[in-house]
Image (tube, rainbow, N blue to C red):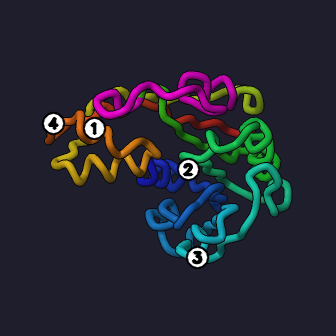
């Protein structure tokens, strides 16, 4: 998701970019040097690997002035929060008029070849557009539901399972190579 998100941010000339839940800075890596990026994450471990500037902070209380950002990205992270609407409100607060908010998440039935359906989280693709619409009146949704990933061997399947916090012993049920169906949504909204 990071590269397509960066392309749209660049095309719209939305800067600076606030990357909420930035991790090690994957979005910054696909933006041009000097574009204007600030990473925010609550994990000091993740921030150690992030480019600068990177700030330790909470998605629900961004350490930024109102109307100071051209774009706010919250990629693959809102499902970690009990109240994603609070974080989306914070994104709205720091966006200037004309700025964009972007987020993404998977469906509960993502990766059916490897994983059983997940229990609902606070921000699954099934409800994510409605959750974003609590703050932004108009949302644009781009969904995917297709085999997008091939895992060639047992080790790749095991890494995938561990990365998705799933039981690594599920690898014993899989014949490799395996094509994995990815399901989810990318959601854009604009502050008018």
Q: Which residue is mark 3?
A: 48
The local crowd at label 3, few if under 14, some if 14 to 19, many if 20 or more residues have their Cα within 10 Å, is few
Q: Quadrant of the C terminus?
A: top right
Magenta stretch: helix, strand or loop mostly? loop
Closest to the camera, between mark 4 and mark 3, is 4
* SS of the residue under disc 1: strand
Query: Which region is colored magenta?
Result: 110-132
Q: Dot 1, how many residues are within 10 Å of its Cα: few (below 14), some (14-19), or many (20+)?
A: few
> Which residue position holds label 2?
12
Q: Nearer the viewer, mark 1 or mark 4?
A: 4
In front of the other: 171 or 147: 171
Q: Residue 26 in the image: state x and y as whole percent.
A: 48, 62
- The first of marks 1 and 4 along the sequence is 1
Circle number at residue 104: none
Tell me the mark number nearer the camera, choosing from 1 and 3: 3
Q: Give percent across and percent down for residue 10.
A: 51, 56
Name the quadrant containing residue 39: bottom right
């Amino acid at each position: 998701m990071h590269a397509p998100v960066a392309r749209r941010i660049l095309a719209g000339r939305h800067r600076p970019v606030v990357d909420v839940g930035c991790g090690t800075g994957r979005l910054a890596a696909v933006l041009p040097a000097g574009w204007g990026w600030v990473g925010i994450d609550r994990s000091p471990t993740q921030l150690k690997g992030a480019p600068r500037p990177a700030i330790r902070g909470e998605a629900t209380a961004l350490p930024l002035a109102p109307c100071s950002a051209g774009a706010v990205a919250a990629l693959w992270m809102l499902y970690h929060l009990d109240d994603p609407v609070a974080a989306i409100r914070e994104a709205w607060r720091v966006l200037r008029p004309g700025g964009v908010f972007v987020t993404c998440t998977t469906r509960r039935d993502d990766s059916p070849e490897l994983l059983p359906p997940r229990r609902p989280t606070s921000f699954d693709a099934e409800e994510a557009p409605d959750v974003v619409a609590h703050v932004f009146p108009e949302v644009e949704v781009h969904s995917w539901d297709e085999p997008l990933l091939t895992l060639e061997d047992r080790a790749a399947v095991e890494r995938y399972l561990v990365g998705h916090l799933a039981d690594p012993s599920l690898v014993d049920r899989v014949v490799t190579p395996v094509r994995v169906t990815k399901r989810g949504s990318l959601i854009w909204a604009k502050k008018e």
